[in-house]
Amino acid sequence: MPVAAHLHRLGASSNPAHFLLQIPGQVSNFVLATAKKGKTRIWKDSLTIPVYVALVSAFVLVVHIVATRRAVQRLWKRLRHQPILESDEDPAPRVPPPREATFTAEIQDRVKIHGGAVTFGFKLARLLGCIVFLSLSIYTTVLDEESRVGASLLGKKRKKKHPKDPSKFTQKELQDLAICLTSLYAVLLSLVTVGNKRRWSKTAARHLNILLLTFVGVYIYRDIFPLATFNRSPIDIGQGWLLYAKLSVLAVVAVIIPLAIPRQYTPVDPKAPMETPNPEQTASLFSLLTYSFLDPIVLLANRVPHLSTDMLPPLADYDYAKNLRANSFPHLDAFMNPDKRHLFFRLMRVFRTEYIVLSLMIAIQVVAGFASPFGVRNLLHYIETGGEKATIKPWFWVLWLFLGPTISSIAYQWYIFIATRTLVRAECIITQLVFEHSLRIRVKAEAPSEGDGATGSDASTINSAAEESDGNGSGSVSEDETLHSQGVTESTLTAQASSSEDQRAETRSTKSTSSKKSESKAGSDKSGSSSASNLVGKINNLVTTDLGNIVDSRDFLYMVLYIPLQITLCIAFLYNILGWSSFVGLAVMILLFPLPGYVAKLVQDVQVIRLKKTDARVETVSETMNVLRMLKLFGWERKMNERIAEKRDEELLYIWRRQILDLINGSLNFLIPIATMVASYSTFTVIMERQLSASIVFSSMTVFDMLRDQLHIVFFVVNQSITGKVSLDRVDDFLKNTELLDRFTLKKDDQISLSSTPAEFESKIGFNAASFTWSSDSDGSLTPSKRKFILRVEDKLVFAPNKINLIVGPTGSGKTSLLMALLGEMHYIPLSPDSWYNLPRSEGIAYAAQESWVQNETIKENILFGNPYDEERYKQVIYQCGLTRDLSLFEAGDNTEVGEKGLTLSGGQKARITLARAVYSPAKILLLDDVLAALDVHTAKWIVEKCFSGDLVKDRTVVLVTHNVALAKPVAGFVVSMGSDGRILSQGSISEVNLDKKLAKEMKVDEELLKKADDTVDESTDEGNKPADGKLIIAEEVEEGHVSWSALKMYFSGMGGNHPILFFFSFVVGIGLCEAALAIQTWFLGYWASQYSANPPHEVPILHYLSLYGLLLLTAVTIYTVAYVIYILGSIRASRTLHKNLIEAVLGTTLRWLDTTPISRVITRCTQDIRAIDGPISNGLWYLSEMTMSMVVKFGAVVILTPIFLIPGVLVAVLGGICGQIYIKAQLSVKREMSNAKAPVLGHFGAAIAGLTSLRAYGAEEAFIDESMNRINRYTRASRSFYNLNRWVCIRVDAMGGLFASGLAAYLLYYRTHGASNTGFSLNMAVGFSGMILWWIRVLNDFEVQGNSLERVEKYINIEQEPKPTKDGIPPAYWPSSGALNVKGLSARYSPEGPKVLQDISFDVKAGERIGIVGRTGSGKSSLTLALLRCIFTKGEVLYDNLDTNSLNLEALRSNITIIPQIPELLSGSLRQNLDPFDQYDDASLNDALRSAGLFSLQQDVEEGRITLDSSISTGGSNLSVGQRQILALARAIIRGSKLLILDEATSAIDHETDSIIQTSLRHELGADVTVITVAHRLQTIMDNDKIMVLDAGRIVEFDKPSELLKNPKGKLRALVDESGDKEHLFSMANFEL
């Protein structure tokens, strides 16, 4: 059948099946027939290979077509007994919709189906190319036929001798015909790619590409490779121009078009394709291999100041979290798939394709890596022998020098491309997996070892601070550590990064152990959420440290495949050129192998101690920063600075030891391969008596270098893989062995009992004969305080619907547990057959936890919690929850971000926002867990009166757990009273209920407090941070671009110390000499080898050369060691100096600066940025210096031998630099975006885990899963771009380096007369130089990124400072002898330009007088106390015991005045450390002070848990009540023996007993000459004072004895007393009678 007819039939066919079934049959019939007729010789000809490939392709196609028939698929399913789906049936014939059939419309449709005009154009070009190739093949056949016929006419004699039947085909004709038919098959395949459905088009394209590449391979073997040889010529050269035409056409259709054709976008979900796919999905093969699809983003980054996430390429749909989840969860999620296999094997199942590709790339990379040494060996051998006996031309080996590294680079970059893609996907999948599994687990009591909540907190000293530092500004550095730190490998040089990783790990694992006051009160009651501390820490650890370790160990294939393969090939290569002497070298390497292992062990030991020392310093620094205000008020800065400096010195000692061990390790890793080389070469020359030559030396040297790299990789990958395995085990254990909630674990039979609530109670909330424990295991009843706890509801308990139900009871009675049991958070154990418990969820449930839970969103978003916004209802909620005033204090109002864990809010504000969320929600049932506990009396009263009695709570069922019975009594409709053993004591109305004795006593105290609260003069406000706008704090300056010179200068001057010139000279010269010695050593080896060609072998003095070579090595190592030691000393000097300057600057700054800077940011400078200076910056600068010097030496060596290469070398360096700068510009932006995108993922994760109970109560799991996936998508988008940009620059710089090296080789070969040894030396230097360009750029980039830490530290060293101490400011030794105070014209302001807060006030106080200061909020009371201590800007004269305070050093002034703030700050540690932090007094004095302050009288009735000098105090004193803290602060004042005491009275509700003890101590326990100034909020505190000062708007309006002031009926004090509810009592206190 003519070809035209075939083409016509194919075009008309909708399904190519019938057509393609016929064609291969015809081809094969023809081939078989012709084979029978001819001899078999042509079937061995290489040109017949494409025919075989075509036959195999045709067969596979036929099988494929048959297998995809629906009938065959149905039959296959029947044979395997699988169900037949509807989709397997034959679809009904579709009638195409009627439309105007125009040729243009049809073409447009066809083009669209095939991926657009460009792709279709390429396909058409390929079809035309195939037709041209077919034509050329036919033409070749015709020419062959003509020449045969012509030959037969000429050779008549031959014809007579060998008569032939002209109808029979010759061997050549058969071959030509087979080639023509194969070409026709190629045309038909390319026709299918253009003319058919997309599915068949792709299949045909694959077959076509394989066939055409086979043609290319055959022609290269036959006609191109012979050109590179001396003894072969092209086989088909006789075809002349036809051969070149065929080669050109094949190059276009088989290589250029497949590489250049854009790939067609295939959506993962055909129903939801992307509007604009990621360029990666449509990029051509060439673009993918060279990462050119990133060009637009790289160029854009260089046009705009900063790349935002929106400018990055869109996320490819195969990277969407939902798609990754859909593909991987069926294999990974233990809940969906009960497969017991280890998580590793299940992950391998998910990423099997990726790991097959990675294995292939490793194999290619290893093999291609040998192209360079192989090429060098043959090239130098050619030069040595002058081409004698050479079969291959030298330009071929020069080409190898370029192609080998290029192919290796492409394979390596593709390996990393796939590996990083897998990394990002694994991060996404594991984060989501742990998150979703966490939503199912029981938040059970994982009991800490401490006996009670109070002591459990001392572990948290550093953690709160370090945690804040993670949340603030840690972005770029810590993220980089997570993604790039090379695990926790001690033997690698990146262990600095890992140390920070370890610290972060510790931070996370104990982060939640600090206990609030409410926690210490809550015992088992709180076990539901306090136990979460361990669990939350553990889960957060899984997705931070453990996930980091898992993805860092992704390169385990290097251990399994790369290292064995590389070592095998290295040995084979060395054996080939050095004979058995290579085994001697190998034996030396194996013998010396344990040495680095031993050093690595020492490094590990030192690292462990060093981390402990770092922890100790960070703990002290964090503690100091958290109580910095107190330190300044007490004048303790100098002493604290000395304490920190001592800790720092201990830490630096271990950093020094670590660096020295690193030096030893580095030297060993350098010396072992050298020893191997020396052993091999000396055996080769001395024992084997063979001759060294340049080709042997320089090629084997490269391979020995490869072996040395294996040493590094072995230590690095093995350590990484072990660390990764441990972390993977932890995640696997979490997924398989964590206890789930009952509803996820109970079998169907059990669920019947769960849901068998009697019909009449289905809409009620309650229990009947039920008991609950915290866990289903044998110890399930243990609470964190190690107390057996079982909640038992033995009788029926039904809460009153549409009313407020109170749950009351003493601490530890199980009030919270009752709510948890209702929510299904506890393990249910029925007590009888009719046992049940019920919480109807149909109308919604809202829950407010005891430990308020807020998300890192705005206040408004926290309250709405995903519900629609109803303005009227929202405003009502704000008003009724008492938030109106709080929101007015924030400039951004309800758009203020609350920060991570609500750090901008006080405890009271968080509690009210949590309550507001519950009240705003449409839920009919509200479960409120002790929401009043964190509120002061006024606010609590407001909530009860306005909210619980308001219209929003009306007709809703409220279950309220509370301690404050007195306050909640008026609104209670139903009360459940619990006993201390987890049982119900009684239930009913408030009058019917029996209260526990302890609770009844508390109720009386609360009633007293309610009365006392009415005496308050000025309202207290919750002290949250008050940000200037919705954002948390002043935005942190983000450094863009390069590190400033001033920051570098600061570091360099720190390194140089007192002799900077000497330091830098010795360090730089040392590195230079070391690199020069190494270069000379390489040259010397070549020189030694060249002696064999110049002299007879027996005349070459081997021992002389060996000793010279050893001497050179020794010199290099010695110089290196000296330079490195000098450098380490300098870097440690800089670390010490910068840390000291930073701490001094922060300790010496003003209170104003502290007010505008979050402490977490200060802590970040002292921890994270200092860590960067100790590690990455000092290491980075060393690497940078070493590499720069090495490149200069290598380039210098090339230029000395080949001066003309100065220009190309400079050009390559400049181009590399430009390339690097372009890349860095894009990379820094993307890295910042990636860091910014990572924090919200972890923030959302942490917030969700912390609020698991609330989240499940609201039923918001799905919403949180979706939000988690959205955040992961944002992170994935940035991180994919980040990793791909690395590939973009690597491939370009590698290509430039390869061109440089091969260009030099070609020049040396054809245009120079250098000997083989000098040529080898030049090539060695050139390859080293070009290979370093990229790493130099990367190291410089990393140094610049880390260098931002220097800038941040520099900014903090230069902050505003308080006056420094002088000699003149030291007071006489006797001062102060009394507490007399004389103030004249004192004015004060908070900033130099700010308004005056005190207006020219003057007053005198005699020694020993007690002065009370009162006034409305904002009248200047606190400002006056700060002005007396010179904490703010003051004018005027203050004489303290006749000395002007302005002339005194601040430390002298402040250490002689003691201030007791409203809520005193305490240090973590023992009570002794708090009273006497610097060990100046004995225990007797301390106990006397505690007795005088009233602590012992407060504790006389307490049996257990008495506070003693050894009692542990948690950070900030959070495990003590405010009253107890005031008593301790008073004791501290008594010990200090100050003559002037300032008391800022606590506004919080201190109980009556504590309050009266404090007042008694103040009146009777202080010396007669001690002046007491009390800033009062309640009048009864000061009415019996000697004098009262009334302030208003910064002026003194009244100052006299109280009895005198009260005589003025229009006086301010009189007005305040008259407003009070207890004025008769106040009058009597002041001895005033009306």
Image: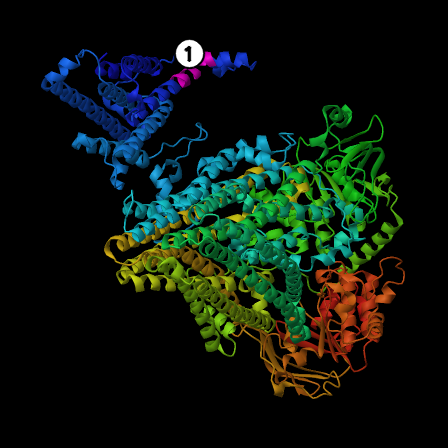
Camera-side residue: 339 or 632?
339
Camera-side residue: 1153 or 1383?
1153
Displayed quadrant of residue 1459: bottom right
Camera-side residue: 859 or 1364?
1364
Displayed quadrant of residue 315: top left
Identify whether 116 is placed above or below 166. below
The x and y percentages for residue 1395 are 54, 72
Q: Mark 1 highlights which residue?
A: 92
Which secondary structure is most common in the magenta stretch? helix
Q: Answer few, some or many: residues within 10 Å of disc 1's Cα (few below 14, many 20 plus, some between 14 and 19).
A: few
- Quarter of the figure with the C terminus: bottom right
The x and y percentages for residue 595 are 59, 57
Q: Where does the magenta region start and end? A: 62-72
Camera-side residue: 1388 or 824?
824
The x and y percentages for residue 962 are 77, 47
The x and y percentages for residue 767 are 80, 33
Kindly identify the amino acid type of the residue bearing the numbered disc 1.
Ala
Reply yes or no: does residue 1220 show up in magenta: no
Identify whether 1467 is placed above or below 254. below
Q: Residue at x 82, y 35 (%)?
A: 771
Reply yes or no: does residue 70 show up in magenta: yes
- Number of numbered labels in the structure image: 1
Residue 1584 visible here? yes
